Image (spheres, rainbow, N blue to C red):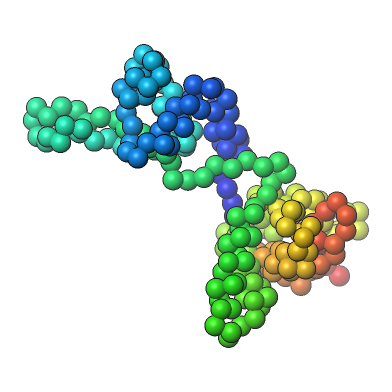
Amino acid sequence: MQKQPLDERLAAVTALDDPTRRAVLSFIVRSPEPVGRDAVADEFGLPRSTAAFHLDRLADQGLLEVEFRRLSGRTGPGSGRPAKLYRRASREITVSVPERHYDLAAGLLATAVERSGDGSIGVMDALAQAAHAAGTALGAGATSLTDVLETNGFEPRTEPDGTIVIGNCPFHQLVADHPTTVCTMNLHLLRGAACACGADPDALQLRPAPGRCCVTIEPPN
């Protein structure tokens, strides 16, 4: 669930503010083979140095990947230096404000459907298991449950009575149409995280209210 830091993701998106750079990225994405700076320079009528600048900026921000290959097919002495080629990066870069994690929800729901397919377990039980396991992975190595919540965009805050409420639901749009399923999934996710970092999972309860996440963390008695 943890993504690349927000400032890094924003920098990658900002790199596409330049229209030439967007066009270069689109050109490479449509190419069936990795592209070198000469091809980009010819396509857009740019000096080779300018083409290289845009390509390297996109690569530095994680939008392109680089490989080196001899285009002549020859090897050994006299075969020349390998060409620097660019292709679309395999990773995804997303920015949402507030933080959302619909990819996690999709993965958990798909896992639940697959596990329940043979009829040995109900789909909601399978979802609870998958969410708990994912939460355990989130909490592994964390110093506290609050740290897990902060790192993953839940925006926890402590009320005067000591109750911790979650200001942001990373599954907000799904909750509007599927509140029972998504809120139950979220509860098991966060209880898994609590178990992994030594917090009391039973302190997490479903307490839906307008303007915040459905899960609260009750103070110790």
Quadrant of image for the N terminus: bottom right
Residue farthest toward the bottom in the current orientation of the protein: 120
Q: What is the number of callouts on the image? A: 0
Is 153 situated above or below 29? below
Residue 106: x and y in percent read 61, 60
Residue 32: x and y in percent read 35, 40
In the picture provided, is 40 more to the left or to the right than 168? Answer: left
| Residue in view at x 64 percent, y 60 percent | 105
The quarter of the displayed image where residue 57 is located: top left
Is 67 in front, or is 118? Answer: 118
| Residue in view at x 54 percent, y 22 percent | 18
Is 3 in front, or is 68? Answer: 68
Is 70 in front, or is 159? Answer: 70
Look at the image and tell me whether residue 116 can be seen: yes
Is 112 situated above or below 71? below
Residue 68: x and y in percent read 27, 35
The quarter of the displayed image where residue 180 is located: bottom right
In the picture provided, is 191 more to the left or to the right than 140? Answer: right
Is 140 situated above or below 60? below
